[in-house]
Image: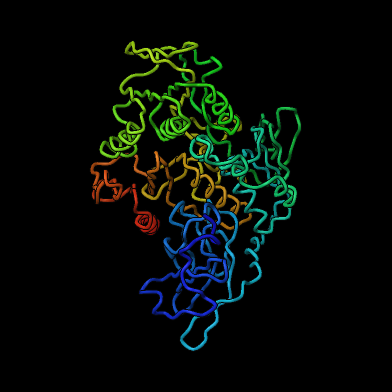
Amino acid sequence: MSDEARPDNGPDLTLGVTLADFGGRDMLRGHVGKKAVLLARVGDEILAVGASCTHYQGRLDRGALEGDTVRCPLHHACFSLRTGEAVAAPAFSPLSCWKVEREGARIVVREQLAPQPAPAQVALPDRPESIVIVGGGAAGFAAAELLRRRGYAGALTLFSAEADAPIDRPNLSKDYLHGGAPEGWMPLKGADFYEKNRIALHLSTTVARIDTDARMVVTADGARHSYDRLLIATGAEPMRLPIPGSGLPHVFTLRSIADSRAIIARAEGARTAVVLGSGFIGLEVAAALTKRGLGVHVVSLDARPLERVLGAELGDFIRALHEEKGEHFHMNTSIASIGAEAVTLADGTVIPADLVVIGVGVRPRLELAEAAGLAVDRGIVVNHRLETSAPGVYAAGDVARWPGADGESLRVEHWVVAERHGQVAAENMLGAGQTYRDVPFFWSGHHGTTIRYVGHAQGWDEIVVDGSIPGRDCAVRYRRGGRTLALATIGRDHEALEEARRLRAAG
């Protein structure tokens, strides 16, 4: 629902409000005409910005203030309350800013201010004349966008092996796949964005080699492109298993919008589907195909869906959500072979299948980095500033392995992590010297129930549940040695924001 249509836009700010109207809260949602406006108390100041996140219209008054910024409760985008700038992904467009006036005890808003300029780039003694980005996913796009936002005026080239411009990849297994999101929602920015911002976007282009000594990128057609700074954001690719029949035309993996289009096209004439894998992608695909009216079977080697990430109790709950919609689970087994009309499981079960999706995880694309002689250890090794072992070369997103706060190295395959990696790498390519300190965050939807997860628990010795998992009102903490490493929530968006803040402070 757009802001203009909302019945809950609060008081008319042109008539003014008082501090008492805040009801002891730091934020108040109101409106100026048909436009929703957020008032925020920052110390003794009252600041006013647009009331809805520019990513997916989350209500910012239900978010969290952090100094003079506000975070969205849905996907944790962060905005400056002073300039409106989207200072942390997944939002990229700014909020509107409004003039706040005082009339006696009343706080009045009537006038929208002109857009505020983003902070200029840091002045560098060795100003880069050319920056090249390899990878058109979350990290690559976010870096390119922020470089131009910071006023970088040099040559900026983005190579993507995909045929489509950078897209909102999480939707591939969610709304887009089940038909709830039109194709027009998918691009992160329209084609005119790249032209207007002088970003040389090369689609369907493979980078064959990186020469760090010559500071040169060579594409598959032999073209050579020099760089002063380089970002490797090659992402990950779906793992493919050596299953007999996995090359048949009705068998798919899901990583690109082309993959999602192909699955949708096949689903239109299908009655049954088998999904191999009970992780987030597998389950989201299963839910999407169920919404399209297919009979869906989920096959997994695991004992429970998502148990290794969320634990047994939450895993059982998620399985029940899917079973309530008619999905069938075949756990502790795998696919032995795939035929034209059915799959055979390792335990001998035969399941009719017009459509098969393999969703058993991904592996980082490390070949370019390895061939270039960069330090690699189950990911491209980077320092706190996301710089690799080669000066001037950075890595971000699914391929990057960075030092965590507790001494453990991390490689995390989350969309928001990749985008924020790209933003920090962009700042540092311009000389900011910024340390990446963000807390991993992701969300996943299962038949109307959304799980939000902050932190990163590679293992735990205790799971503490507050509230009711079946009641869809809970906070699940993953602890080790008495310390909370991560938190999963259902129906407690603000608690997830607060835990992310605590984890950032602790790190």
Answer left or right for 173 relative to 157. Answer: left
Give me the residue at 55% from left, 56% from top: 54
Residue 263 x %, y %? 54, 27
473 is higher (above) or lower (below) than 102: above
Question: What colour scheme was applied to this rendering of the protein?
Answer: rainbow
Residue 49 x %, y %? 54, 68
- Foreground of the two, 11 or 144: 11
Residue 142 x %, y %? 59, 48
Quarter occupied by residue 313: top left
124 is higher (above) or lower (below) than 343: below
Answer left or right for 392 relative to 197. Answer: left
299 is higher (above) or lower (below) than 393: above
Give me the residue at 56% from left, 17% from top: 249
- Foreground of the two, 404 or 458: 458
Quarter occupied by residue 496: bottom left
Residue 334 x %, y %? 37, 18
Question: What is the residue that sits farthest to the bottom in this orientation?
Answer: 104
Give me the residue at 39% from left, 12% from top: 344
43 is higher (above) or lower (below) than 287: below
Quarter occupied by residue 318: top left
Circle count? 0
- Foreground of the two, 426 or 33: 33
Quarter of the image with the C terminus is bottom left
- Foreground of the two, 386 or 133: 133
Give me the residue at 24% from left, 41% from top: 461
